[in-house]
Amino acid sequence: MLARTGFVARQRFLAPLSRQRNASTSPSDHHNHHHIEEDTTVYPKEGFATPAWRRFFVLSIIIGAAYQFAPEPSEEAFVTRWLAMYTTTSEKWLDMNVRHTVLSKEVAEGVNLFTTATRPPINRMRFPQMMDNASPFNVQVGLNADTRDFVAKTEHEV
């Protein structure tokens, strides 16, 4: 009885698996023969007369002529000579840079002169008329020293 129960249980377990349909099977037995329309496009004949081959041959001839008539490696190319004709030499650039440096230094000195300049000191007096108070002819005796006999000495004589 126990063996029979196991057999029944196994059948119940396998029953849903046998009812499953595989992906390769279809519910109907219709076989589609893949009816595709015939390609009616007319392709051009391939050969060496196509535009691509013509361009290749013309380009090959142009490259060969350019190589044949190109300057020797020892010669300078046309573009190099043309650039050398219109470019400024290094000596000229050096002269221009030296001149620019000298002019820049002069301008800097002028700017420095004007930015560091100060007005001369002014001694303002409270009563400026005191300068004109005394007369040179109204000098009392003994107030004026006689400096006619003095001799100025230089640094070496001191």
Image: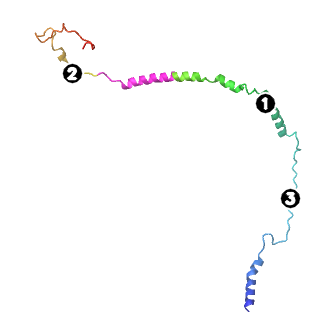
Is the C-beta separation of discs 1 and 3 under 8 Å? no
Q: Where is residue 14 in the image (x, y as percent from the top left)?
A: 75, 80
Residue linked to disc 1 = 67
Residue linked to disc 3 = 36
Work out which quarter of the rendered image holds the N terminus and state it: bottom right
Q: Which residue is rendered at x = 59% and y = 24% of the image?
A: 90
Mark 1 or mark 2, whichever is nearer to me: 1
Q: What residue type is labelled 1?
A: Tyr
Q: Position of residue 125 (x, y in %)?
A: 21, 21
Residue 105 part of the magenta-drawn span: yes
Image quadrant in which you'd find residue 20: bottom right
Per the rendered image, the range of residues in magenta is 99-120
Mark 3 or mark 2, whichever is nearer to me: 2
Quick one: label 1 or label 3, which is nearer the N terminus? 3
Residue 2 part of the magenta-drawn span: no
- Could you classify mark 2 by the number of other residues whose Cα lies within 10 Å: few (under 14), some (14-19), or many (20 or more)? few
31 or 82, nearer to the observer: 82
Q: What residue type is labelled 2?
A: Met
Q: Which residue is rendered at x = 78% and y = 30% of the image?
A: 67
Q: Is residue 117 left or right of residue 84?
A: left
| Secondary element type, mark 1 | helix
Instruction: State how far apart marks 1 and 3 are (Cα).
Output: 54 Å
| Secondary element type, mark 3 | loop
Residue linked to disc 2 = 125
Image quadrant in which you'd find residue 77: top right
Q: Which residue is rendered at x = 15% and y = 13% of the image?
A: 134
